């Protein structure tokens, strides 16, 4: 199954823009995890809670949420697609400043997710929680956590056009 990538999605878009591509499975953990926090934006307690919340969300909705924090070019890149079994029901949040792009949050969204959370949802979500002002006030951890909670809450409500307030 092919996976549609959001316009701001770094896995396909940023990697595809580079002629050599990035596919570095050696940067992936040996043990499977839904949260790969290379940049240590989350505390160990926040990581554990997020992993638990992600498992609960997947059980309740069938949608997979995955988190990768990185500092490009230190990225597993395309290798995460196989590692996580990325498909049409998968949401990948990549937290990376990409050399000062101004927004920490980038989303890769499976085609079936758009039935519940349309493209505008993702643009508003990134703008709301990934912007410089939010990051300075609340930090990277809250940016990631609040974005996940908005996704979770909307999927549990069977969809939203924009993130809740």
Image (cartoon, rainbow, N blue to C red):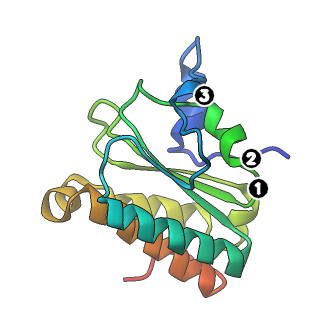
Residue visible at 72% across and 39% down? Answer: 82
Q: What element carries label 2?
A: loop
Task: Using the image, tell me which numbered label, if any, was put on residue 97.
Answer: none
- Mark 1 touching mark 2, by CB under 8 A? yes
Q: What element carries label 3?
A: helix
Q: Position of residue 99 (x, y in %)?
A: 30, 30
Crowd rating for badge 1 (residues with CA inside 10 Å; few <14, some 14–19, many 20+): some
Q: Position of residue 106 (x, y in %)?
A: 46, 48
Q: In the figure, 70 relative to 163: above or below? A: above
Among numbered discs 1 and 2, the one appearing first in the sequence: 2
Task: Using the image, tell me which numbered label, if any, was put on residue 88.
Answer: 1
Q: Position of residue 150 (x, y in %)?
A: 46, 75
Q: Which of 146 and 75 is in front in this view?
A: 75
- Residue highlighted by disc 2: 3
What distance separates the C-alpha of mark 3 from that of mark 1? 22 Å
- Mark 3 touching mark 1, by CB under 8 A? no
């Amino acid at each position: 199954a092919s996976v549609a990538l959001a316009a701001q999605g770094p896995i396909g878009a940023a990697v595809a823009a580079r002629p050599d591509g990035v596919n570095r499975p050696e940067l992936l953990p040996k043990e499977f995890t839904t949260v790969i926090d290379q940049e240590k934006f989350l505390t160990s307690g926040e990581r554990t809670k997020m992993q638990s919340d992600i498992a609960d969300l997947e059980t309740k909705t069938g949608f997979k949420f995955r988190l990768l924090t990185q500092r490009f070019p230190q990225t597993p890149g395309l290798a995460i697609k196989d590692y996580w079994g990325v498909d049409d029901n998968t949401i990948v949040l990549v937290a990376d400043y990409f050399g000062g792009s101004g927004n920490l949050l980038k989303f890769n969204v499976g085609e079936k997710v758009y039935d519940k959370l349309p493209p505008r949802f993702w643009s508003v979500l990134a703008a709301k929680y990934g912007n410089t002002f939010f990051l300075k006030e609340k930090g990277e951890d809250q940016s990631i956590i609040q974005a996940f909670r908005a996704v979770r809450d909307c999927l549990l409500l069977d969809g939203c056009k924009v993130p809740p307030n």
